[in-house]
Image: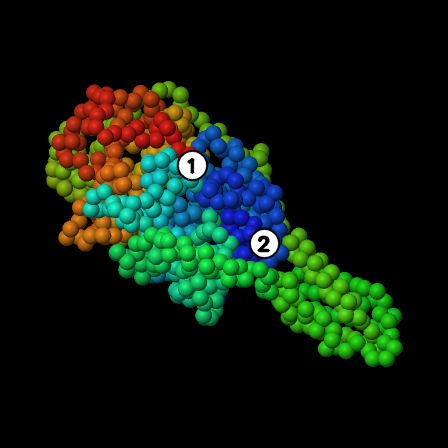
Amino acid sequence: MSALPEILAPCGSMESLTAALRAGADAVYLGGKRFSARKNAKNFSREELAEAVRLCRRYGAAVYQAINTIVSDSELEELASELEFAAALGVDGIIVQDLAVCRIAREAAPGLRLHASTQLSIGTLDGVEFAKAAGFSRVVLARELSLEGIRELSGAGIETEVFVHGALCMSVSGQCYLSAAIGGRSANRGLCAGACRLMFSPQGRPKNGQCALSLKDLSLIPHAEALRDAGVSSLKIEGRMKRPEYVAAAVDSLYKALRGESYDLEALRSVFSRSGFTDGYFTGKTGKAMFGVRSQEDERAAKDICPRLRELYRNERQRLAVDMELFAEPGSRVRLTVSSLGDSVTVTGEPVSEAKSRPTDSEEVKRQLTRLGGTVYLAGKISLRLLGSPYLSAAEINGLRRRALTELDEKRIGRLMRPIPFDRDRLSLAMPKTLNMKHPELIVRVERVSQLEYLDVKSLYGVIIPADGAKEYLDAGYPIEKATVYPPRGFDGDAALDTLTLAKGLGFKSAACSNPGELILCKRLGLEPVGGFTLNIKNSLCAWEYAKMGLKAETLSPELTAREASALSAPVPTGAVVYGRLPLMLTKNCPIKSELDCSRCTRRLTDRTGSEFSVLCHKEYGWFELLNSRFIWLADRMRDFNLDFGVLYFTVESKGEVKRVYDGYINRLPPSGGFTRGLYYRGVE
């Protein structure tokens, strides 16, 4: 049998933490009051974080802190303070999305272990190589991977962490802007409003129960042994906003599944699910069966099952073996030594008296020493040296045992509470910024090469075209020096490699990257990498880190305000998406298939207000994109942006519409129709 992977439990409160540890978790992850991707969980104050770390040390469990949101320049000082406190606690790892955290840790606290959050959208070998180059010791893999994909990445020389149970987002993590676009609540900043759980339908305005973006909850617990054999380091349960009963049930089930024991799947489903569970990505069986909603029946089942599940964590789980050695001889002080996990303590009592009639029986001593209920210990090796005719009362033995185990707890806690040095003097948070106002040059990005037909491409500042259209672009007589190519979005490493290799062979020099793995792929192929907006660059430190990793230009996060974007510092040209129906989701499962097959595809979803969201189908590559119902229009506001370039992001527009929009931006025309200013003036929470 392969070594058992870590069971990693979510903790949104102290009660959930206790439930996780008592149910058998090897590690927990939690968040403070700031910079946590579950901002609406109760989360932990600094005092509670310190208490939580001490409790985990008592159990010998690891504790990881989620500092995994993207931040603005105005928040960098507070971010550094949060990392300094985490270092002082000696947490075992920091879960990270924003590369600003990597820079701060490298400069001030190189002893901090960093885990690449699933929000970094890592699902290829090149993504893993990026994580290693950026200084991460562990990668939380994207949830859209199959068993074969997980096995491949788990053999790439870095720890891997895989979500095995809990809520499943329709969108690839880190690539969702639906909540931000609809209500200004950013999923990348821990305030996802769960807009995907609202009603959407491909057949017009939805009726009750039509939720085309709502998936069932994930459960790979039945595949726990396969994941173990695939080399996964950590099996992660989602749910920092869930109740303690849920946490205990999921941990207990996973604990048993890893050991080949039976567990209660129905209880697990009852405590929380959305019409049951799915393993569709893992098994490669996507489609209608993956969709589900939280029903009233699900709610009733949870209410009924919770009292029984509380029994899973009402008492301590005895999980740490303790060896005991007791010495007793009349006239000498009784001595008890206890040892566990490499720690050992010895306590002494009063001098032992001579037995007046019957000496203390060794079996009675063992019986008292092994009364370990209410502790985290189970009896290991028991050694007794009873010389002469000693007499020990049960109360005396019990007192020695309790005192010894308390001291053993404290010794282990003290040993494992390892503060990590944090040197503020080595930290530089302010980066230089050119203050000369620029008016962004316009770059045209198209979904199809044919959309360029009515434009004078030779006069454009630049164009971004799909890599699989590179030959079509050249055959149309367009200038190669103007063009940057981009591979298909998603985690099909072969498709990205094939299309970029083709473009490279035709003479193209640069490529746009939508996830960190593509940056590494571009460098490997000798193409200049250009950062797309889905890298979520929101602050100057992150911008400088990506430039250090090789980006030659960067498109900033659409969650910046115009003022923030203009003030951001970077050592390479920077820009923003200034027109387009912004892709709000990248999905592995087609949302149309929640209700319709391909023969009846409508290529759009409609929400409860009647707004229509186009769906881009890239089924040849296995991926789909949900576009905003409104287009960003900033032609009349371009003077508000001190940037090198602005991207006109064309998707479903006809070639005539492309020409009209481009001319509108050249002439700084005001908007008309169903437009939005995006988040550039209202910002995000």
In this view, the residue in front, 46 or 475, is: 46
Q: Nearer the viewer, residue 143 or 371?
A: 371
Q: Is residue 33 left or right of residue 566?
A: right
Q: CA distance from mark 1 to mark 2?
A: 32 Å
Mark number for residue 56?
A: 2
**Residue at position x 68%, y 55% from top?**
410
Residue in the image at 30% along x and 56% along y: 290
Name the amino acid type tagged 1: Cys
Picture residue at 39% right of the left edge, 56% below the top: 298
Taking depth in this image into account, of 1 and 200 the one nearest to the observer is 200
Earlier in the chain: of badge 1 and badge 2, it is 2
Q: What residue is drawn where x is 44% and y is 53%?
A: 238
Residue 243 sits above or below residue 343 on the image: above
Pick whichever, 468 or 412, lies toward us.
412
Q: Would residue 406 be found to the left or right of residue 574 on screen?
A: right
**Picture disc at residue 557:** none
